[in-house]
Image: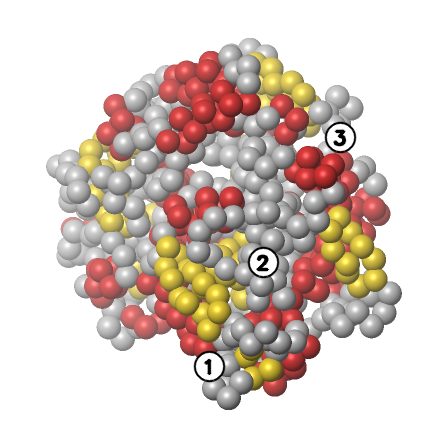
């Protein structure tokens, strides 16, 4: 149910009431990673900053940033989301989270092209990292930001948020030596060891504030009283299983952003502006309604001219059946990538020659055209890193040495790889190993029409090549925990990684499925694994200890090799203060990824926005369009970028 404020000012120009600002399906809008809370780097600090690497395209839209919001004031904006209000869980630790891109505010935003963050809740004058004392000091702007219930956002909110994260981990897996609430507006974290200068960044400034201190304080008090591991695990399970409905969220006034939910029905949630928010007057509308749709239902709304903004390029398949004024506003290459996540618990998937063949037989240019439209971004190298990160940390000379897997599909080379792995084709054209076993495996994709269509295309290629995938779909709430603990029916899945800060943590950190993933922090005792000399991860069968070529690109191991322990190598990287040593470790990780292909990239993600260019103006020079990966439309909603166009 929505309020009475339904008439847009632009009706004066003969335009019908808009159902405005569609987020297409959850998968298309933000990729897998954007459907849940940001992945964690293992210490409670999620990813919020990155670089879209320029390449903005205004498509002829004038910069009308001087227009004020009055053209659309007292109007309603309708968006679309992939989560049903009755099913959503607003608990940041739970599954099936939703609307977080609307209701969670950023302390600050930083991209790799910015010298200083865009300070939001945090005060830049009082937020800094002291390398001498290993201290991150954070200061909240005094009486400037408020929860939806009118209470000020204070340092205690962030202190409680961080401690609830950290205290769910065993003591030996906590990176903070101390966490101190200095006063009402300041708090600090003292690390237990130095942090590599390459990844110090801005610490904890980019994790969006999800739940207020009043709600999480009980969790913190229980965690502070823990005396045994079993107690902590029980409390952590209780926290994860806590259901916070959209009505609970409304009743407790827990939105930290400019938008707060006020009402809901079976298919929509209505948000109104928090007038205490400093950005409230920047918005050209004062009501936001999020409707649930997917696939063809979204397409129909677009075709009927009921949608005015969406994430990604405008769908090419809808051109000719949709209004001409719906145009791509801007697009740029994101840090994130779409890739394949291999779990080595299946003997065939554990054979790196099979993984090489499965990548090599795919025509990546076709997949890019399907996902992004013609002329999309191509991933040229299998280094495990984004192209911008390659340029920053590896350099072109090193990247040129990596093995050059084909991007247009090469069945002959793929067949060579299969034979190297001990496979031959049988009379039915299927590949089988020396034991007569064909290559059977479970290929799982997330649900959602875009993912399933892409996965089906990949599945068809693999079947045509002589492999025997069993294609399944699973929702995101199933995929993440099953990848974390090594259970379930997943041998290969269509996945995503690499969005965020644009440093090596986004690619090589071993702590969760969005990165390299060998163990799950807070669940697996990786120190004990090292003490026991464990050489393979129980979670996914990937190697902990592996032989890699000393010469990058030598996938046949014709030259010298060296043995590396990936967990120990990461721990060394995180703490070293030596930049030269850091770069060498990054190169070893890139060599490993190129050699072993645990998570080969298919193509880069795209930051893009399409919209109604007839009635609305989208200033195309705004940095939030281009430089914060997977959140383009989110930031339009959050910071008042979109304005009405004068007629």
Which of discs 1 and 2 lies nearer the camera? The answer is 2
Q: Crowding near pointer 1: few (<14 within 10 Å), some, many (20+)?
A: few
Q: Crowding near pointer 3: few (<14 within 10 Å), some, many (20+)?
A: some
Q: Quadrant of residue 529?
A: top right
Q: Which residue is drawn at 37% across and 59% down?
A: 473
Sooner in the amino-acid sequence: mark 1 or mark 2: 2
Foreground pick, 609 / 544: 544
Q: Name the residue under label 3.
A: 194
Position of 441 with respect to 408 (left or right) is left
Sooner in the amino-acid sequence: mark 3 or mark 1: 3
Quadrant occupied by the C terminus: bottom left
Q: Which residue lies furthest to the front in this view?
A: 435
Q: Give yes or no for contact between labels 2 and 3 (Cβ–Cβ under 8 Å).
A: no
Which of discs 3 and 1 lies nearer the camera? The answer is 1
Foreground pick, 16 / 3: 3
Relative to residue 510, is residue 231 depicted above or below? above
> What is the spatial separation of the Cα atoms under label 1 and label 2, in whole angstroms?
23 Å
Q: Name the residue under label 2.
A: 344
Give the percent coordinates (x, y) of residue 310. 34, 56
Q: Which residue lies furthest to the bottom in this view?
A: 427
Give the percent coordinates (x, y) of residue 525. 63, 35
Q: Mark 1 points at which residue?
A: 464
Relative to residue 154, is residue 526 depicted above or below? below
Q: Residue at x 30, y 42 (%)?
A: 284
Quadrant occupied by the N terminus: top left
> What is the spatial separation of the Cα atoms under label 2 and label 3, in whole angstroms?
34 Å
Position of 500 with respect to 6 (left or right) is right
Disc 1 secondary structure class: helix
Tally of numbered discs: 3
């Amino acid at each position: 149910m929505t309020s009475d404020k339904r008439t847009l000012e632009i009706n004066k120009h003969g335009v019908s009431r808009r159902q405005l600002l569609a987020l297409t399906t959850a998968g298309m809008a933000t990729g897998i990673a954007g459907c849940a809370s940001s992945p964690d780097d293992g210490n409670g600090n999620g990813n919020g900053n990155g670089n879209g690497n320029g390449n903005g395209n205004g498509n002829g839209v004038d910069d009308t940033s001087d227009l004020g919001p009055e053209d659309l004031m007292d109007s309603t904006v309708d968006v679309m989301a992939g989560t049903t209000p009755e099913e959503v869980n607003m608990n940041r630790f739970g599954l099936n989270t939703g609307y977080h891109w609307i209701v969670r505010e950023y302390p600050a935003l930083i991209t790799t092209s910015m010298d200083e963050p865009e300070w939001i809740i945090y005060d830049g004058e009082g937020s800094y990292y002291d390398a001498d004392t290993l201290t991150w000091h954070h200061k909240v702007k005094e009486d400037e930001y408020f929860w939806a219930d009118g209470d000020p956002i204070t340092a205690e909110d962030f202190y409680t948020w961080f401690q609830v994260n950290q205290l769910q981990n065993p003591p030996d897996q906590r990176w903070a030596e101390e966490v101190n609430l200095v006063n009402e507006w300041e708090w600090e974290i003292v690390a237990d060891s130095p942090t590599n200068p390459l990844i110090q960044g801005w610490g904890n400034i980019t994790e969006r504030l999800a739940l207020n201190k009043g709600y999480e304080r009980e969790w913190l008090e229980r965690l502070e009283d823990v005396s045994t591991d079993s107690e902590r695990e029980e409390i952590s399970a209780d926290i994860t299983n806590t259901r916070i409905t959209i009505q609970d969220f409304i009743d407790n006034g827990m939105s930290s952003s400019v938008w707060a939910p006020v009402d809901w029905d079976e298919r929509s949630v209505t948000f109104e502006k928090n007038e205490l928010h400093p950005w409230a007057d920047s918005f050209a509308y004062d009501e936001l309604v999020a409707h649930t749709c997917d696939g063809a239902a979204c397409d129909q709304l677009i075709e009927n001219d009921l949608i005015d903004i969406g994430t990604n390029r405008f769908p090419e398949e809808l051109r000719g059946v949709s209004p001409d004024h719906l145009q791509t506003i801007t697009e740029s290459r994101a840090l994130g990538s779409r890739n394949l996540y291999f779990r080595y618990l299946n003997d065939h998937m554990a054979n790196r020659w099979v993984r090489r063949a499965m990548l090599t037989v795919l025509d990546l240019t076709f997949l890019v055209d399907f996902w992004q439209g013609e002329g999309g971004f191509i991933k040229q190298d299998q280094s495990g890193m984004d192209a911008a990160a390659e340029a920053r940390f590896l350099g072109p000379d090193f990247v040129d040495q990596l093995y050059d897997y084909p991007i247009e599909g090469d069945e002959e080379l793929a067949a060579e790889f299969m034979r190297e792995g001990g496979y031959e084709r049988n009379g039915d054209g299927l590949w089988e190993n020396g034991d007569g076993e064909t290559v059977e495996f479970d290929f799982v994709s997330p649900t959602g029409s875009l993912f399933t269509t892409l996965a089906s295309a990949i599945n068809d290629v693999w079947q045509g090549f002589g492999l025997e995938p069993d294609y399944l779909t699973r929702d995101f709430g199933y995929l993440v925990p099953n990848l974390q603990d090594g259970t379930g029916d997943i041998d290969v899945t269509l996945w995503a990684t690499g969005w965020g800060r644009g440093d090596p943590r986004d690619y090589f950190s071993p702590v969760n499925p969005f990165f390299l993933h060998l163990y799950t922090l807070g669940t697996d005792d990786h120190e004990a694994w090292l003490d026991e000399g464990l050489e393979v991860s129980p979670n996914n069968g990937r190697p902990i200890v592996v032989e890699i070529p000393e010469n990058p690109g030598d996938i046949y191991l014709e030259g010298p090799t060296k043995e590396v322990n990936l967990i120990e190598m990461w721990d060394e990287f995180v703490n070293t203060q030596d930049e030269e040593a850091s770069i060498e470790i990054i190169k070893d990780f890139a060599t490993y990824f190129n050699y072993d292909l645990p998570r080969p990239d298919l193509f880069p993600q795209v930051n893009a926005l399409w919209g109604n260019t007839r009635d609305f103006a989208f200033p195309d020079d705004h940095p939030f369009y281009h430089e914060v990966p997977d959140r383009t439309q989110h930031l339009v909603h959050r910071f008042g970028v979109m304005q009405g166009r004068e007629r």
